[in-house]
C-alpha cells in the first residue's frame, strides 16, 4: 500500500520537535549565528526530546527502534527552526547511529549506553576532508593494518564538537574502502585544531579540523570488528538526513517569505497578489514537496532494506541540495533588499542552502 | 497506515501488464499513427477493449458500483492510484494512443464528479459493454481557454418540450470525434458540453450537459493538426439548436447566487489533474529509459553515488532527470492517494500537474539534445516523445494556471485577490 500519513507516535514526536523548533531553536538562531555560540541549555533541551534515545533498543539503554522515516520526519521539523542548532543536538548520533547500524556487538555494548545515558555528551564523527574533489568513497585519510591495530593517518575537517570529544568515529580509506574507526580523544598523534572552522554559515556550530599523525587504534576499534562494515548503508543514512534537513531549511525560507509577501505592500496591493511573486511561491512549495516525498521514499526503502535504497538516498540528497539552494535564493529575492539584511533570517538560510552539497556527514538518521 | 511506498498488488500488476502492452501493442504502431494523423488505430482499440474487459479491469471510467467488494474487506480504496498507474504506463507506451483508449475519459469524469446517482448509472454503465465507447469533455471555446468562466455557449430551456437548447462553438475537444461521431465499430458515446444557463450569472450560471453522440444540430467542424499526440483526435464542434433532454444537466437546473456549478467543473479537475500529470511522467520515463539504453549501448556508464563535482555533464543530466521523474511521480501518487481517501487534494493535485508539466517537456527535450542526430531523427521515437510531451504542460490547465491555483491555495487567496 501507499500511504503518506505518519503514525500517531511519529505525529507526537513531530509535534514535540515542532514546538522545540519554534519556541527554542528559531528565537535563538540569529544570536547564535552572530555570536558564534549555541547556549548549552538549548542543546540539552533538544537532546531531551529523545530522538537518538528512541532510536536505540532497550538492550543498549534506549527505548525504541531506529527508523529512517521517523528520523527524516523529525529532522525536517527541527531544521525548520535552525540548522546549526539541529546539527548540534544530533552530533552524538553521528557516533552512535553508525555503531548501531554496523558496529560489533561488543562496540554496541561498550558505547551505546554511554552515549545515550544522561545529558548530551561529546561524541562525534569525522568524515569530511578539506580537499578539492572530496568524495566520501575515496578518502585521503588512510588506515593501515599494523599488527594488532590500525594506523590512521591524514586530516579531517568540519568535525563538530571535536574539542573535548570523548571519542570520535573517524572514517578512513582502508585499501580503497571507507571504514570507520573509533578513536578515543587523547590518542597519541591525534590533534584537534585550536581554531574553529570559519565557514559561510553554521557559525554557531563548533566545527574543527582534526590531524591524525599515525594514530594507532586497536583492531577491535574498527567499526564492525575484524571484518569491518558496509559503508554504503551509513552513507545513505547520512544522505537521507541531509535531504530531510534541506527540506526543513527550504520550508523555513518558504514560510517566512510567504508571510512577508502577504504583509508587504507595493502599488496598492500585497506583493503576494502579484503573479511574479505568487508563482515563485507556488514553485517553491512544489519543489519542496517533490523532494520531501523523495526523501521519505528513500528513508522508507532504507528501513525496508530495499535494493535501490542506497541509490534513492543519493538521488534524494542530490536533489535536495539543488532544491534548497533554489528555494532559499527565491526567498531572499521575495524580500528584496530586506532579504539581504541579516536582521531577516532568509539570507542565513540561503547561506545554509548552499552548504548541503557539502554537508553530508554532519548528520545521520 | 504509516508512511509506506509499497505498490499495492493491483498497482504492481497494472505496471507489469501495461508495460508489455506499451512495448508490444503501442510502440510498434507509434510511428505509423504519428505520420497518419486522424487514422483510427482500430486493432489497438479493439484489443484494449477486449483485454480490459477480460481482465475485469473494465475501462478507465471510474465505476459507480464496482467497489463494493473492496468496502467489505475494509482495505483502503485505491481506485485512483490504479488509474494513475495505468495512465503512466500507457503514456510510457504512447501518449497519443493512450488517448485512443476506449472509455469515459474526461467526459465520464465530469459525470462522476457532478452527476446524480441516476445520471451516473445512466451514462457510466455503458462503458462496461461489448463495444468500445468514448466520451469527451467540451469546455474550451475560441474565446475562452484557461479563463473558462468566459464561456459563451448558451443553454436555454424550452419549457414546451422540456429540453435544453444549446448553441455555441467548442474547440480542443480531445476524442471529440470518437465520442460523438458514429462508427460501426464503436458503441454510442457522448460529449459533456459546458454552457451557461444565465449569461448574467457568471460562473454561477455555468453547467455541464451530457450530449449524446449523433445529436442533431451538433457537428464536428474540424480535426486539428497538431505538434504531437497526433493519434488523438482534437475536434472543433459546433452546436446549433442542439436539443438535449432536461435530465441531462449535471447539477442544479436553476441559477443560485453560488458558483457550485462552476465548482463542479473544477472538482473534475482536482480528480483528473494528477491523472494528466501521470501521463506526463509516463512519456518522460519512456524517453529517459531510451536514453539510458542508448548510453549503455555506447559504453557510457552513469556513476551513481559520486559527488556532484566529479560527475560528467551527461551523468549530471541523467541523475537530475531521474530525480525529477521519481519525485514527480511521487507527487502524482500523493495526490491520487488523497483522492482515494476522500481527502481534499486541490493543492496536491495542481502541484503534481505543475511538476509533471515541467518534467515531461524538460526530460524529453534533454534526451533529444543528448542523443544528438539520433535523438532528432524520426528513425527513433525520442523526437516524437518530445513533441508529445509538450501537451502535458498545456492541457488540463497550463502550467501557469496551475501555478495560480497552487498560489491561491498556499496563500489562502480567492480568485479576486490573486488574479
Image (spheres, grey):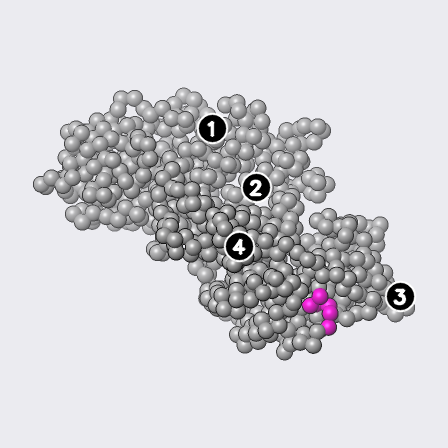
Q: Residues within 10 Å of mark 1 (few under 14, many from 20)?
A: many
| Cα–Cα span, label 2 and label 4 | 34 Å
| B17 and B377: which is toward the camera | B377
Q: Secondary structure at mark 2?
A: helix
In this figure, what is the number of numbered marks? Answer: 4
Looking at the image, do the residues carrying marks 2 and 3 touch, with CB atoms under 8 Å apart? no
| A66 and B293: which is toward the camera | B293
Judging by the rendered image, the residue that carries numbered circle 4 is B377
| Cα–Cα span, label 3 and label 1 | 68 Å
Taking the magenta stretch, the answer to whether it contains residue B299 is no
Judging by the rendered image, the residue that carries numbered circle 1 is A348
Q: Which mark is residue A283?
A: 2
Judging by the rendered image, the residue that carries numbered circle 3 is B159
Q: Chain of mark 4?
A: B
* Mark 2 or 1: the one toward you: 2
Q: Residue B318, how many percent across, how many down? A: 44, 48
Q: Residues within 10 Å of mark 2 (few under 14, many from 20)?
A: many
Q: Which residues are magenta?
A: B177-182
> Left or right of B405: which side holds A64?
left
Looking at the image, do the residues carrying marks 2 and 1 touch, with CB atoms under 8 Å apart? no
In this view of the protein, can residue B345 be seen by the observer?
no
| A352 and B294: which is toward the camera | B294
Q: Residues within 10 Å of mark 3 (few under 14, many from 20)?
A: few
Give the residue displayed 56% in from the left and 47% down from the top. B358
Q: Secondary structure at mark 1?
A: helix
In this view of the protein, can residue A351 be seen by the observer?
yes
Amino acid at each position: 500500500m501507499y500511504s503518506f500519513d505518519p503514525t500517531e507516535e511519529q505525529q507526537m514526536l513531530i509535534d514535540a520537535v515542532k514546538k522545540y523548533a519554534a519556541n527554542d531553536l528559531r528565537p535563538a538562531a540569529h544570536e547564535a549565528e552572530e555570536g558564534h555560540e549555541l547556549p548549552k541549555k538549548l542543546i540539552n533541551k533538544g537532546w531531551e526530546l529523545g530522538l537518538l534515545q528512541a532510536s536505540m533498543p532497550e538492550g543498549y539503554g534506549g527505548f525504541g527502534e531506529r527508523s529512517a522515516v521517523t528520523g527524516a520526519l523529525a529532522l525536517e521539523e527541527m531544521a525548520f527552526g535552525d540548522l546549526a542548532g539541529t546539527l548540534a543536538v544530533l552530533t552524538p548520533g553521528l557516533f552512535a547511529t553508525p555503531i548501531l547500524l554496523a558496529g560489533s556487538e561488543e562496540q554496541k555494548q561498550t558505547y551505546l549506553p554511554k552515549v545515550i545515558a544522561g545529558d548530551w555528551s561529546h561524541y562525534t564523527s569525522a568524515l569530511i576532508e578539506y580537499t578539492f574533489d572530496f568524495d566520501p568513497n575515496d578518502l585521503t585519510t588512510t588506515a593501515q593494518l599494523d599488527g594488532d591495530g590500525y594506523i590512521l593517518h591524514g586530516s579531517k575537517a568540519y568535525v563538530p564538537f571535536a574539542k573535548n570529544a570523548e571519542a570520535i568515529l573517524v572514517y578512513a580509506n582502508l585499501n580503497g574502502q571507507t571504514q570507520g574507526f573509533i578513536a578515543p580523544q587523547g590518542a597519541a598523534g591525534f590533534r584537534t585544531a585550536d581554531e574553529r572552522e570559519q565557514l559561510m554559515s553554521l557559525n554557531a556550530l563548533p566545527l574543527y579540523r582534526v590531524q591524525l599523525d599515525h594514530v594507532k587504534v586497536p583492531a577491535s576499534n574498527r567499526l564492525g570488528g575484524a571484518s569491518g562494515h558496509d559503508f554504503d548503508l551509513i552513507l545513505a543514512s547520512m544522505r537521507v538526513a541531509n535531504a530531510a534537513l534541506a527540506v526543513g531549511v527550504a520550508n523555513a525560507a518558504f514560510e517566512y517569505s510567504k508571510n512577508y509577501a502577504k504583509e508587504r505592500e507595493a502599488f496598492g496591493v500585497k506583493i503576494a497578489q502579484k503573479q511574479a511573486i505568487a508563482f515563485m511561491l507556488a514553485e517553491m512549495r512544489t519543489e519542496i514537496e517533490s523532494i520531501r516525498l523523495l526523501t521519505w521514499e528513500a528513508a522508507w526503502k532504507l528501513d525496508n532494506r530495499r535494493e535501490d535504497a542506497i541509490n534513492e538516498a543519493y538521488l534524494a540528497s542530490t536533489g535536495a541540495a539543488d532544491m534548497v539552494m533554489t528555494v532559499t535564493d527565491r526567498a531572499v529575492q521575495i524580500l528584496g533588499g530586506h532579504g539581504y539584511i541579516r536582521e531577516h533570517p532568509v539570507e542565513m538560510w540561503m547561506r545554509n542552502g548552499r552548504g548541503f552539497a557539502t554537508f553530508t556527514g554532519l548528520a545521520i538518521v | 497506515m504509516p508512511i509506506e511506498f509499497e505498490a499495492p498488488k493491483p498497482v504492481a500488476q497494472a505496471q507489469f501488464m501495461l508495460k508489455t502492452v506499451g512495448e508490444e501493442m503501442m510502440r510498434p504502431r507509434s510511428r505509423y499513427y504519428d505520420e497518419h494523423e486522424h487514422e483510427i488505430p482500430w486493432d489497438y482499440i479493439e484489443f484494449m477493449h477486449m483485454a480490459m474487459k477480460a481482465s475485469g479491469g473494465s475501462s478507465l471510467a471510474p465505476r459507480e458500483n464496482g467497489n463494493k467488494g473492496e468496502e467489505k474487506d475494509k482495505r483502503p480504496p485505491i481506485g485512483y492510484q490504479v488509474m494513475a498507474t495505468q495512465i503512466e504506463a500507457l503514456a510510457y507506451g504512447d501518449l497519443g494512443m493512450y488517448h485512443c483508449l476506449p472509455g469515459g475519459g474526461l467526459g465520464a469524469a465530469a459525470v462522476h464528479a457532478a452527476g446524480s446517482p441516476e445520471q451516473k448509472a445512466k451514462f457510466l454503465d455503458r462503458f462496461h459493454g461489448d463495444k468500445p465507447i468514448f466520451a469527451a469533455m467540451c469546455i474550451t471555446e475560441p474565446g475562452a481557454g484557461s479563463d473558462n468562466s468566459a464561456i459563451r455557449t448558451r443553454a436555454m430551456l424550452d419549457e414546451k418540450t422540456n429540453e435544453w437548447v444549446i448553441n455555441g462553438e467548442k474547440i480542443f475537444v480531445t476524442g471529440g470525434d470518437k465520442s460523438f461521431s458514429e462508427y460501426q465499430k464503436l458503441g454510442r458515446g457522448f460529449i459533456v458540453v459546458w454552457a451557461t444557463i444565465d449569461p448574467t450569472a457568471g460562473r454561477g450560471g455555468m453547467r455541464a450537459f451530457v450530449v449524446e453522440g449523433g445529436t442533431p444540430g451538433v457537428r464536428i467542424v474540424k480535426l486539428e493538426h497538431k505538434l504531437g499526440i497526433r493519434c488523438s483526435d482534437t475536434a472543433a464542434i459546433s452546436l446549433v439548436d442542439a436539443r438535449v433532454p432536461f435530465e441531462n444537466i449535471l447539477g442544479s437546473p436553476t441559477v443560485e447566487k453560488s458558483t457550485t456549478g462552476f465548482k463542479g467543473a473544477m472538482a473534475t479537475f482536482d480528480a483528473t489533474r494528477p491523472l494528466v500529470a501521470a501521463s506526463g511522467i509516463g512519456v518522460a520515463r519512456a524517453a529517459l529509459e531510451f536514453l539510458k539504453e542508448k548510453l549503455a549501448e555506447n559504453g557510457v556508464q552513469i556513476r551513481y553515488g559520486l559527488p556532484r563535482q566529479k560527475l560528467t555533464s551527461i551523468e549530471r543530466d541523467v541523475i537530475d532527470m531521474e530525480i525529477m521523474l521519481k519525485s514527480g511521480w511521487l507527487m502524482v501518487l500523493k495526490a491520487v492517494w488523497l483522492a482515494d481517501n476522500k481527502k481534499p487534494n486541490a493543492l496536491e493535485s495542481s502541484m503534481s500537474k505543475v511538476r509533471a508539466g515541467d518534467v515531461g517537456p524538460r526530460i524529453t527535450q534533454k534526451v533529444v539534445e543528448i542523443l544528438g542526430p539520433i535523438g532528432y531523427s524520426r528513425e527513433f521515437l525520442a523526437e516524437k516523445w518530445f513533441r508529445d510531451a509538450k501537451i502535458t504542460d498545456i492541457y488540463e490547465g497550463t502550467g501557469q494556471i496551475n501555478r495560480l491555483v497552487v498560489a491561491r491555495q498556499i496563500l489562502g487567496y480567492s480568485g479576486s485577490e490573486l488574479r
